[in-house]
Amino acid sequence: MQEAQRPASATRFVVGLSGLGGGLLALWLLAPWRGANFPGFIRYAPIVPCAGVFAVIAIMERLWPNVRGASLPGAVLRPLDLARVAVKLWGLIVTLAMVALAYWLLPEYRGTFYQPYWDFLLTLAPLLLLCPLYFAWMDRRIAEPGDDYYHLGRVALGRERPDGARLTRHLLGFAVKGFFLPLMTVYLHDEIAALYRIYQAAPAPIWNSFNFFYHLSYTVDLLFCVVGYTISLRLFDSHIRSVEPTLAGWLAALICYQPFYSVIGRYYLQYDDGTSWSQWLAPWPTIRSAWGGAINVLAILYCLSTVAFGLRFSNLTHRGIITDGPYRFSKHPAYIAKNLSWWLIAVPFVGNQDAAASLRNCCLLGLLNLVYYARAKTEERHLSQDANYVAYALWMNDHGLFRRIGINLRFLRYRAPVVSGDASLSAGRNGAAVPSRRN
């Protein structure tokens, strides 16, 4: 009997690594970024390394078909229909108007915290002029020209009855972007600023700095997050296939991010009492260096899990199954790396108080770990509509990292859903977590 094969990845890990090279080169050319003399329309300086990531990946995926798991639009399938393009543009305008209305209504977006995001939008605003050309080019090439923009446009014009499933997918997809993209752009702005402050403060011994590599790892992660949420286009097969359909899935994800984690983390899951792992291990410098190195290794693994998605990273949405890079060894490498790193950083088992307080801190961090376990399971359930993930997840049961080292963790094993008829279901991993003030 022939052994089952690991399904092809939506994009190869080498593509993400190449994009990482482009982003790092742009970061190096950008330093010191605050003194850079950009054109007036570039209000958001981190857009430069984001462009470096995007440019390299876009070129590779368009020129070398073997590096991706799906064909990209290219061949002309039909004549251009300008009326249909106009309706799609109207659907886009209606969508953006609803997002803008949400930002205007919600007090969360009125403060200065999100100023980098508004700068980001102003920087990208000129690209909206390309939307008519993009829709016209894609209208002749995509298999189904009557997409969600077209449906929403016709509904808004009163020409078609609304399809609840299609509108829900479209609007929830933009809700995901509208919530996460502001956070990621702000965090990227802050991480690059921290990275350059470390660089400027100690340029000579910088390569031995724990903080430098730690912030560099999260900068890389956020570069791919911002690019992923921005470049959701059929042109690169990075569009949204489906959105998390359950309230449990949304809750498990959203409580890990601001502004919700400000409440959850402070009043319910406050596992960190301010103990510094570096100070705790100060009497043993060799152990402290090894401990810091382990944290950096986990941070690098975390960011590489995001790099593996290329242009396809996103929480709460399915944009292609990734089976390469770190996902060759685990379905959830980012969650594993992130949660392990918190134990090394917070050292809740040490504490500044008594043993009971340390035990309480360990229990609270354990509860946060369970939140991420719930995220993993709801993501798998969501992507159970993609047969590629069923094959991947079942393959991982026998070839995953834990299985290879002789550990059979049944609560982490994937179980294909039982369905009637000939339907083939699967569960999937839609993306690695991203830092929200370290959560």
Image: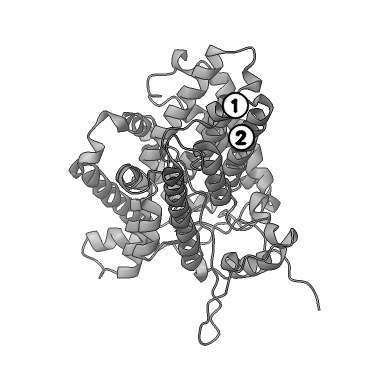
Q: Amino acid at mark 1?
A: Phe
Q: Nearer the viewer, residue 93 or 271?
A: 271
Q: Is residue 396 rendered to the left or right of residue 420? A: right
Q: CA distance from mark 1 to mark 2?
A: 7 Å
Q: Nearer the viewer, residue 46 or 353?
A: 353
CA neighbours of label 2 inside 10 A, class few (<14), some (14 to 19), many (20+):
many
The image's mark for residue 49 is none
| Residue under pointer 1 | 210
Q: Nearer the viewer, residue 45 or 183?
A: 183
Residue 140 on image: x %, y %: 48, 57
Q: Earlier in the sequence, mark 1 or mark 2?
A: 1
- Position of residue 379 relative to residue 66, above or below, is below
Residue 225 on image: x %, y %: 48, 42
Residue 48 on image: x %, y %: 50, 27
Q: Amino acid at mark 2?
A: Asn
| Residue under pointer 2 | 296
Q: Is residue 395 rendered to the left or right of residue 131? A: right
CA neighbours of label 1 inside 10 A, class few (<14), some (14 to 19), many (20+):
some
Tell me which residue sits at (40%, 26%) in the image: 44
